[in-house]
Image: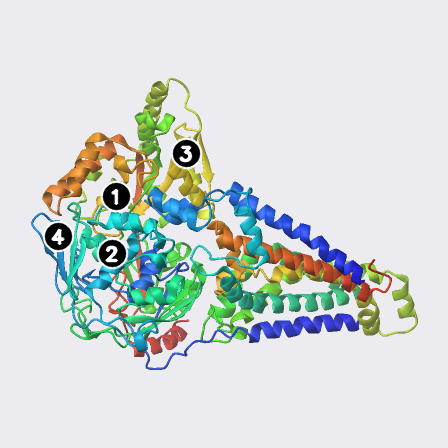
Amino acid sequence: MTTYIIRRLLYCVPIVFGVLLLTFVLFVVIGGDISIEIAGKGASQETIDEIREEYGLNEPLFLGWDSQFINHFKNALTFDFGRARDRELVIDKIKRGVGPSLALTVPMFFAVVVIAVSLSLVIAFVHGSMWDIFAVVVCIAGMSVPFLSFILFGQYFLAYKWGLFPIFFSSDLTMAQNVALPVLIGVAAGLGGNVRFYRTVMLDEMGRDYVRTAFAKGLSARRVLFKHVLKNALIPIITRMAMAIPFLFLGSLLLERFFGIPGLGYLMVEAIGARDYSVISAMTYISAIFFVVFNLITDICYSLVDPRVSLE
Amino acid sequence: MDFALKFLSILFVAALASIAGCDGSAPVEEPNEMVLHHVLYTKIAGLDPANISDIYSRIVASQIFETLYDYHFLKRPYELVPLLAKGMPQISEDRLVYTIIIKKGVYFQSDACFPGGKARELKAQDFVYSFKRIANIKTLSPSWACLDERILGLDEFRQYTKSCAGAEDVDYSRRVEGLQTPDDHTLVIKLTKPWPQFIYSALADTAFAPVAEEAVAYYGQDIISHPVGTGPFRLNVWRRGSYVELVRNPTFRVEPYPCEGESGDAEAGYLDDAGKPIPFADRVVWTVIEEYQPAWLLFLGGKVDAGVIPKDSFDEVVTAGGELTSAMKDRNIHLKTFSDPSTYWLGFNMADDILGKNKPLRRAISCAIDRERFIELFFNNRHLVAHGVIPPMMSSYNPEIEEKGHARYDPQKAEELLAEAVKVRGGKLPVLKIAMPGAGTWFRQYGQFLKRSLNAVGLEVEVQYMDRPTFQEKLRAGSVEMFASGASAAIPDAQEFLSLFYGKYRAGGPNAFNYSNPEFDRLYEKAQVLPDGPERRELYQEMELIVLEDCPAAFLNHRVAYVLRHDWYKNYKPHAFAFGLSKYRRIDLAKRAAYRELVKKIE
């Protein structure tokens, strides 16, 4: 397994290099010179030239040790992302936003997985009944309603009309109080799709011989579902979960924006809009690393969950 | 199963840890503490005056920093009064030398950057330093464009800074002929040529507020988040992107609330606090809310003191007659409207082969746009039709401009002009392109409106949606045919609007129309050095008519702001040009406390 892990870690090098190259080409080579925009309206050419020098935009793109790409690569490897367009250190922006973003996305993710997996087990058990049809209809309805509608509805009724939650992020409240409603909305909006997915996974398992045998042996439904079916369905569950985890770091754009959670959700979108290359580069780079690492963790989990899987 | 449980447990712990580790608590509001609760509709970029370019940063910074002059809070038409200056400047006969006496007893707030952390008195040298800092090319100040070739010797100082390795290597003790301090409280500024807008554009602008050299040296690049000013408030908390909190500056001098205003101010209660020391508030809080729904709900819930009306809730708030609805009146909410110094247009690139050489085509496009319908659809009938480039609230506004008919919707005339345009072109007109400075829903609807308007008279149009940086770059490069844009004046002088058509500002400058007319340029240069008065106003109006005749843009609308305030929010008189107004605001704490009960009764 150690060899496998080392080999997979070595695979990360070209992947990360590719990501760096792609972001550089997209935002610097294709995106063009941002100095004019930074200089603002009516700026003189000399100011623009000075900005180009300050941001290293007058250096060659690829050729030379001082080229923009080599600097971009060096900065990424040393996690020195420099300053954003508003002159704040990019790493400070990320550090400040990562806590609130995770405070929102981790409980949301956790709750969605637990509720969706449990519900899907029960629904799979009553497969073909009215309850199953009802659950599928509700899931499809939930998937069809736009996420924004969940937010507008939840904020208006649960927060404003009924006063159960704060309308907006408030410094006077704890983070748990501030994220309670956005988490609830995120869970409600995310359940439909997840229950549908896990239901399919569970149904695949429910039709297998060992389940029939377990029931025939007289095991309780609870024991069959949670002991046997769940364990055997873990591989697709883990795959889905592990693929979603890196995205938790990126926060949730709409929820953060509507509830004023100072996370990373908006940071990336705003940076793209403003062509804040330092922020885009840092966020993409960190996301890529997370993605690669969690892919590796997923593979290791497979071998832990299923003894038939061996890593070579 | 065990593994699954362990995995989920780790996630659960991570979830709890992430919530527990992010306690964003701030000082809780005391019952008798006067706190102003405001909304910022976008994030602020920084609080360094020399690097302020957005309006929201300016709003916050203006409570911390002060300028030599400021607008009178109540008087209209807008009038400048001394703030850090002892009186209005003494101006030499040739209007080139300004001598300004600085008030004594004005202190920078206490800060770690000063010896012993104690407040230091403001001196004339601080203004000289601040001007030089803007001139320093390493500061990359967007405000330099305002000073370029204006102050004697300052351009040479800027040239010198180019040779310095970094901002910290610049020797600020270098003499600049146009910036002198005969003593600690006298500032003498020498201009290269008369500049009538000098007091407005530089001496009353937060970007030119005095900054302590010690603070810049102490905080370096982080000066953007460590403002050290002389104003009534000081920064207490700034959570970038979400929350700003200022507290009263204990070293602020005694300043009284204005004792006079315009007619009707006394009846409106604006003079109830006349002569009382300001500021009234203990804290000023801004929450960054970029979506209208939460901002609106917080306003209705009494969590913020004033707010704007979301487009989709307009009918719920204002009747067809422009009055507040009974639902709002029951909540003791008040409506205030005021003219904004802004103009929006569909611009034409005069350097473009198709549009630039075809005046009938440009005029046809202007005639094809139903501005009243546009204002009804997009602004709930709130805005005013722009008959020219100068907004109605400016003293140089031509009241007869509407009669000239340049903004009249006339599809029949548009078709006639198009036929003429085809002749000028010598063949069929190609598909014209409109550049929009955004790709969101609003811009798409706006683009569709323009497209339909022009299609209706037989013009083929393609609307190109792009992000603002791309839009600006294209404008600068002159690679657009038509573009949707607008401008807002920072001072009560129409010169800012007219400068957009000055020939020398083409090719990458503010003149995005690439418009050039020698007669316009001659009048502009003449007006540029004239002080405000009938002669200058006549010149402005003449220039406006030249622009309208040449039609480098179809002027569409002037913004009218509608703002709401709660009954408890006192001294809330909107101002089009001043930003440092929090010091005048007062809260009736009893009324604010009673609001919750009032809402319960209503709902």
Give a yes or no on whether discs 2 and 1 share a subunit: yes
Residue on which the image places disc 3: B479
Given the image, on which type of amino acid does mark 4 rest? Val
Camera-side mark, 1 or 3: 3
Q: Position of residue B195 (x, y in %)?
A: 17, 47
Give a yes or no on whether discs 3 and 2 share a subunit: yes
Camera-side mark, 3 or 2: 2
Residue on which the image places disc 1: B497
Work out whether B308 lies above or below A176.
above
User: Which disc number belongs to residue A20?
Assistant: none
Q: Earlier in the sequence, mark 1 or mark 4?
A: 4
Given the image, on which type of amino acid does mark 3 rest? Ser
Q: Is residue B288 visible?
A: yes
Residue at the location (43% across, 62% down)?
Answer: B289
The residue marked by circle 2 belongs to what chain? B
Looking at the rendered structure, the secondary structure element under dot 3 is loop
Camera-side mark, 2 or 4: 2
How far is disc 1 from disc 3 in space, using C-alphas? 22 Å
Asked if disc 2 and disc 4 are in contact, CB closer than 8 Å, the reply is no
